[in-house]
Amino acid sequence: MRKLALTPAVLALIAERFKVLGEPARLQILDCLRRGEMTVGDLVEATGFGQANDSKHLQLLHTLGFVVRRKEGLFVHYAIGDERIFQLCDIMCGRLESEVKSRRKLLAV
Amino acid sequence: MRKLALTPAVLALIAERFKVLGEPARLQILDCLRRGEMTVGDLVEATGFGQANDSKHLQLLHTLGFVVRRKEGLFVHYAIGDERIFQLCDIMCGRLESEVKSRRKLLAV
DNA sequence: CAACTATATTACCACACAGCAATGAATATG
DNA sequence: CATATTCATTGCTGTGTGGTAATATAGTTG
């Protein structure tokens, strides 16, 4: 497997994508979409954010390929565009659990 | 493997960690550390950032457990604290390559 | 103790962006 | 065509944070 050279430009691209995931609101949207595709209105209701807010987050997620769009009449259906997102989140969760564990260890000493 | 419940609080913790990786400067620092531990001074030279700047990034990376510290006299040696970082970056790179590929496909049509 | 060095911290500025309200664009319905 | 609905876009404000210079802290050396 050939590796990309980690030039500053490539690092910037990678950072850009991590940054998009570095926002609770967007993670919440992605988590909602985990159960299947949803319209913007559905997501507004599910997340409790404003319509404009959700729409902007979805644009960003779409631009970077994290979600895909499907237009149907007045509605726009969004869905997960890359399952690797959850792989990333799982690894982060693993990190979280490690942190909790080592923190408990510190307190126990 | 038991899964963490993705409550808003947990999502915030995950996002916080993605956010830290969502900064080219910090990714560059982590990439430098890939070859082995380095002092702050080494990193300042290697990255070309200011000393205060590097120090602040390192503090943040350390707080969230991405790097570990080892003090030795006047010097502080930093090293990667969790190899999973590279796993995360590899997945992101895979995403990047997919993006490039599909973009090429679009142009080819 | 005084002078020096490596790192951390503080204060500040500039900029990016999340959230919100208002408006616009596209499509459907009567 | 007029109206209503869904979503996208724009303009605005407040907050957060990256970069930098100045200063503080900790450790070393003489």
Image: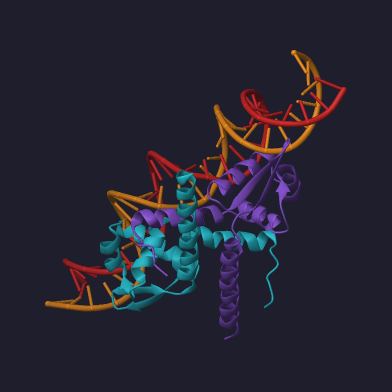
Chain colours: A cyan, B purple, C orange, D red
Question: Along the horizontal axis of the image, is B4 left or right of B19?
Answer: left
Q: Nearer the viewer, residue B106 or D27?
A: D27
Q: Residue at x 47, y 48 (%)?
A: A103
Question: In the rendered image, which quarter contains the N terminus of chain A?
Answer: bottom right
Question: Along the horizontal axis of the image, is B86 left or right of A97?
Answer: right
Q: Residue furthest bottom?
A: B109
* Up-down relation of residue B57 to residue A97 (above or below): above
Q: Nearer the viewer, residue C29 or B97?
A: B97
Is residue A21 visible in the rendered image? The answer is: yes
* Up-down relation of residue B58 to residue A86 (above or below): above
Q: Residue at x 68, y 72 (%)?
A: A3
* Up-down relation of residue A2 to residue B72 (above or below): below
Question: Along the horizontal axis of the image, is A96 left or right of C24?
Answer: right
Q: Residue furthest front?
A: A109
Is residue B22 visible in the rendered image? The answer is: no
Residue D17 position, x and y percent, is 52, 45
Residue A70 position, x and y percent, is 37, 78
Residue A27's image quarter?
bottom left
Residue D21 position, x and y percent, is 68, 31
Count all numbered tags in the image, as a single digit: 0
Residue A54 position, x and y percent, is 35, 61
* Up-down relation of residue A76 to residue A51 (above or below): below
Residue C28's image quarter?
bottom left
Q: Nearer the viewer, residue D9 or B28?
A: B28
